[in-house]
């Protein structure tokens, strides 16, 4: 048997996910001939067919299915090994992989910029997703999670910031339409509200149940979209206090207890306990903490 090459396995896995050489080549930023060379070399070394070539792309054989099921776990183990070895060296180079919910990804940029300015040899990879990526998967080093404190015994959890929200409108909206002085005037205004997936949040539910359908002129399943609509003057909507502090043209509604600032959870900096001595992970936490303190001051 020829010597196996891990890069060949990695390329084969990407082809399996992409379904074609062209798509895999685009992901790998190389040409399809290079991808094909990896596939041919791996199949020759194993003496096993992993793919069936057809006009619509590459389909997995039974052997290919087994490969595709097992490789993610092996890849995770390699990433974990890389992290442990780099933790021993304690230098500030290489990658740091971060995940957070989509609504907060943009909020991290200033802290990451400051971190990169101090540690220019570190490359940041950010994955914004509403899915929880298990720390033990090795896919990321750090996760910033919003909501209740995570209870996973295998992760270290550190508090970054309390998440409070309030209702805001841009100054341009206020200049044109004013603001409601009490509950009776709510339906005289244009509201930007989360869709039904967020109506269970008390802060949202107390307002939405008092609004007519016609008063809600814009809705989204993401708070980030609502925020963008508020910033451009489309209407009144919920915005986090941290984000609002960056935009001086936002006007906060505070004429009623209904619109008072409400605590909706916290932002948590989490990482696997195996990374407790990782210099990059520990340093990055301080940047996030200092940045959110500056915004809330």
Image: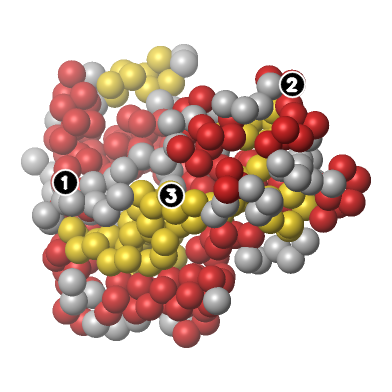
Residue sitting nearer the eye, 115 or 92: 115
Query: At x 74% / y 66%, what residue is drawn?
Result: 248
Query: At x 43% / y 21%, what residue is drawn?
Result: 57
Checking the image for residue 214, the label placed there is 2
Q: Mark 3 or mark 1: name the one nearer the start of the chain.
A: 1
Query: At x 45% / y 37%, what residue is drawn?
Result: 201
Instruction: Kindly state the secondary structure of the residue where label 3 is placed.
Output: strand
Gap in Å between the C-alphas at discs 3 and 1? 38 Å
Whether residue 97 can be seen here: yes
Instruction: Kindly state the secondary structure of the residue where label 2 is placed.
Output: helix
The furthest residue to the top: 55
Q: Mark 2 or mark 3: name the one nearer the start of the chain.
A: 2
Where is residue 133 drawn, in percent x and y? 29, 45
Where is residue 32 drawn, in percent x and y? 47, 38
- Residue under label 3, please give it: 264
Where is residue 232 drawn, in percent x and y? 78, 48
Where is residue 52 drawn, in percent x and y? 31, 18
Query: At x 18% / y 51%, what residue is drawn?
Result: 151
Gap in Å between the C-alphas at discs 1 and 2? 53 Å
Gap in Å between the C-alphas at discs 2 and 3? 27 Å
- Residue under label 1, please give it: 74
Locate residue 281 relative to residue 195 in the image: left or right. left
Other residues around mark 1 within 10 Å, as few (<14) / some (14–19) / many (≥20): few
């Amino acid at each position: 048997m020829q010597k196996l090459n891990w890069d060949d396995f990695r390329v084969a896995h990407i082809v399996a996910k992409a379904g074609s050489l062209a798509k895999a080549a685009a992901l790998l930023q190389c040409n399809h001939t290079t991808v094909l060379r990896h596939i041919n070399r791996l199949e020759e070394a194993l003496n096993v067919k992993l793919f069936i070539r057809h006009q619509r792309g590459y389909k997995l054989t039974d052997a290919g299915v087994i490969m595709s099921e097992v490789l993610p776990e092996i890849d995770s183990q390699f990433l974990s090994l890389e992290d442990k070895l780099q933790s021993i060296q304690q230098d500030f180079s290489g990658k740091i992989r971060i995940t957070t919910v989509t609504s907060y990804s943009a909020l991290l940029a200033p802290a990451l910029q400051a971190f990169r300015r101090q540690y220019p040899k570190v490359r940041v990879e950010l994955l914004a997703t509403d899915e929880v990526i298990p720390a033990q998967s090795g896919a990321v080093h750090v996760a910033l999670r919003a909501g209740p404190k995570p209870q996973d015994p295998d992760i270290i959890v550190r508090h970054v910031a309390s998440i409070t929200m309030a209702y805001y409108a841009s100054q341009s909206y206020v200049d044109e339409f004013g603001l409601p002085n009490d509950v009776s005037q709510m339906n005289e205004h244009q509201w930007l509200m989360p869709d039904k997936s967020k109506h269970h949040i008390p802060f949202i539910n107390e307002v939405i149940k008092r609004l007519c359908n016609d008063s809600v002129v814009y809705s989204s399943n993401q708070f980030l979209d609502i925020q963008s609509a508020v910033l451009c003057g489309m209407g009144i909507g919920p915005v986090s206090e941290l984000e609002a502090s960056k935009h001086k043209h936002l006007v906060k509604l505070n004429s009623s207890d209904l619109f008072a600032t409400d605590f909706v959870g916290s932002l948590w900096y989490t990482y696997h306990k195996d990374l407790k001595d990782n210099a990059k992970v520990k340093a990055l936490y301080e940047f996030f903490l200092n940045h959110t303190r500056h915004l809330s001051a």
